[in-house]
Image: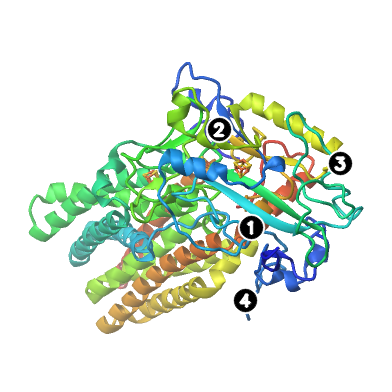
Amino acid sequence: MNGSDVTREGSEGGRPGRAAAPEMLRGGPGADGRGRRKGGKRGRGEQLMAPPAEFESYYGRPVVKAPAWRARDIAGYFFLGGLAGAGSVLAAGAHATGRTTTATAMKVSSVVAVSLSTAALVNDLGRPGRFANMLRVVKPTSPMSVGSWLLAAYGPAAGAAAASAVTGRLPRAGAVATGTAALLGPAVATYTAVLAADTAVPAWHGAHRELPYLFAASATAAASGMALVVAPVRETAPARCAAVLAAAADEAVTKAVERRLGMVAETWHQGRAGTLLRTARTLTAAGAAVGAVFAGRSRTLAAASGLALLAGSACTRFGVFAAGIASAEDPKYTVVPQRAAKEARRTTPTHSAERTQPT
Amino acid sequence: MTDHLLGDHLLSGIEPGPARDAGHSGAPPRTGFFTDTSVCIGCKACEVACKEWNALPEDGLSLSGMSYDNTQGLGASTWRHVAFIEQEVPARGGPGAPARGGPLTAEGRTQLPLAETSDGTGGGLDEGTGGGTGGDLRWLMASDVCKHCTHAACLDVCPTGSLFRTEFGTVVVQEDICNGCGYCVPACPYGVIEQRPSDGRAFKCTMCYDRLGAGQEPACAKACPTESIQYGPLDELRERAALRVDQLHAAGVTDARLYGHEPDDGVGGDGAFFLLLDEPEVYGLPPDPVVTTRDLPAMWKHAGTAALTLAGGIALAFAGPALRQLGAATVRRGRR
Ligand code: SF4
Ligand code: SF4
Ligand code: SF4
């Protein structure tokens, strides 16, 4: 038995009843990551949302596979899609209220953002040459399929709106395109939340109810940030207002996510994800506040607050992305909530088909 | 609590005919795997046969330190994976396991290779396990594979239609269509399907679709010397599995349990299900997997509401300043 030291569970003799969690809330020699891993690892200084739960795994290997997506491409895609989509709504508002400079700038921003986001998506494919296969079928069960069709409709509309605004030609058609882009824009901004949530990744799927609102808030923050950067000071009032609404919503929804996720919320607090999400909240709040107070007067401060809002939105997307990866890579976040759900079903009499699993 | 966007049974819940609902009229009975881990001897013939038949590339030759498991897990180039778990057996009469092993004799099998218990009634594996605590170590071996879920998340989320449901009710990737978007990878609740780094496309077990079409059983089942891997119509396999569990319970192996056999579980039942001797997570299996698309109608609803909120919020942002201007103008006019 040469391999035995790898797999013995330290000095623990028998296998205590695994379901009986309370007596097992101890660390001990078995919790060191060798062999079958028992017990969650505790990071230093982080706030635990729930007592460290006991769990078992196969040599600490993940149960679900994290996506092989590159953060730059896919989190970047989320960010740019949000910027483009919400930007189109701002552009339409500016267009309708005669804020022409803002309208034109936001239309250009949207078409650039959606082009870049599509490029990021194509770049992340294992076979970029086969991108067209995305439009082979229409599948409402696949958020990526829905998204591809959405982009296929939105992209040209955003492009036409920008082209008309920049060249000043075909104003009637330009207005129609602006309206179309504004109608599709919110969907472009929020469907990416469904894309992430419709996976077995605990930190994403567990937040599937809240994630669309978070992405909507983050997209609004990005677009109003862009408007603050590009618009003349006298036209910034709506953007300032939108930024404040977005920042407030962002804060509220993040809180709701943390409540919903239970122990999986750790992944939103720890490591790279924690840093990014904390930075995001600071930047978004600061950007919105500075914008609200000073952007009506100072061009420089308006641009600075706009940049903070843009950076905050990007940090939110990269943070959510990182939290998802972290939650997929540690079997704890798959096993513990699923155990709890199974246990809850066993102890409630009306179990049958209605599954109450939170994740 | 999903709504009826696409009909509940297509996304989750009990689904008696996945092949039929996928459009195969006159489909043959659904076939699958029953992997009885209580008789697995860890020979890995299944892994080898799978690699050979499907011409899977080599995927790393590293020593993992995980017992005899250097394969480590299912992936793009590993469609059968034999897990090895070494664990200490609780003392006889201890909590949870009054007796493991036992002098069982099943038809065609002289003695079950369940590990030795401390009182020496087990069979087979006692030689050489004596180091340290002396004979109270047992091995669990289990050959893992794609579950060919009734509600397969990988298939649901695939944007190209590359993943499809076969007439046998199994789930297969079409290599010539997959564009390597990688969405199926995080969607699978079992962590089965994976993109091959050198290739970009996603691969997984096909249940030897080519062999099934020719009336043959899959390569792994054919190669398994102990009939740990059994292939056949799913209904028959489920019956056989239930009998086997009863038999093991009667023989005192109270830890024996089925995994993935219930048509009303979170994925609507697995096309490849298992008999396990410990909790699923010990084998690296999720204890309560749920097909992610069960919640998709709710997600679309929330995304729709969120989109409307976004539009409404921005409209409000334009209305606010406009109203203020209007108010100010009215006040000015009133003064004049
Ligand atoms: S186990 Fe995973 S890869 Fe296999 S059919 Fe189910 S979801 Fe798809
Ligand atoms: S990687 Fe291939 S099989 Fe997987 S979802 Fe994308 S297109 Fe479908
Ligand atoms: S399942 Fe069969 S072929 Fe595979 S390791 Fe076990 S006994 Fe050997």
Distance in Å between CA atoms under marks 2 and 4: 47 Å
Q: In the image, is the residue at mark 3 within 8 Å of ligand 3 by its beta carbon? A: no
| Amino acid bearing label 4 | Gly
Q: Nearer the viewer, mark 2 or mark 1?
A: 2
First along the sequence among labels 2 and 3: 2
Looking at the picture, which amino acid does disc 3 mark? Gly
List the residue tagged with mark 1: A58
In space, the residues marked 1 and 3 are separated at their CA atoms by 25 Å
Query: Which marked residue is nearer to the observer: mark 2 or mark 3?
Result: 2
Confirm or deny contact between disc 4 and disc 3 (CB under 8 A). Answer: no
Label 3, residues with CA under 10 Å away: few <14, some 14-19, many ≥20: some
Q: Are marks 4 and 3 on the same chain?
A: no
Q: Which numbered disc, 2 or 4, marks the residue closer to the eye?
A: 2
> To which residue does mark 4 refer?
A43
Foreground mark, 1 or 3, reads 3
10 Å neighbourhood of mark 1: few (<14), some, or many (≥20)?
many
Indicate the secondary structure of the residue bearing disc 3: loop
Of the four image quadrants, the one with ligand 2 is top left
Name which residue type carries label 1.
Tyr
- What is the chain identity of the residue bearing mark 2? B
Q: Which mark is residue B252?
A: 3
Instruction: Identify the residue at image location x=7%, y=53%.
Output: A169
Task: Give the CA separation, mark 4 to mark 1.
Answer: 21 Å
Check the picture and name the quadrant holding the N terminus of chain B: top right
From this view, report whether residue B243 is shown above or below residue A142: above
Mark 2 → mark 1, Cα distance in angstroms: 27 Å
Q: Can you say which quadrant of the picture contains the C terminus of chain B? A: bottom left
* Distance CA(mark 4)–CA(mark 3): 42 Å
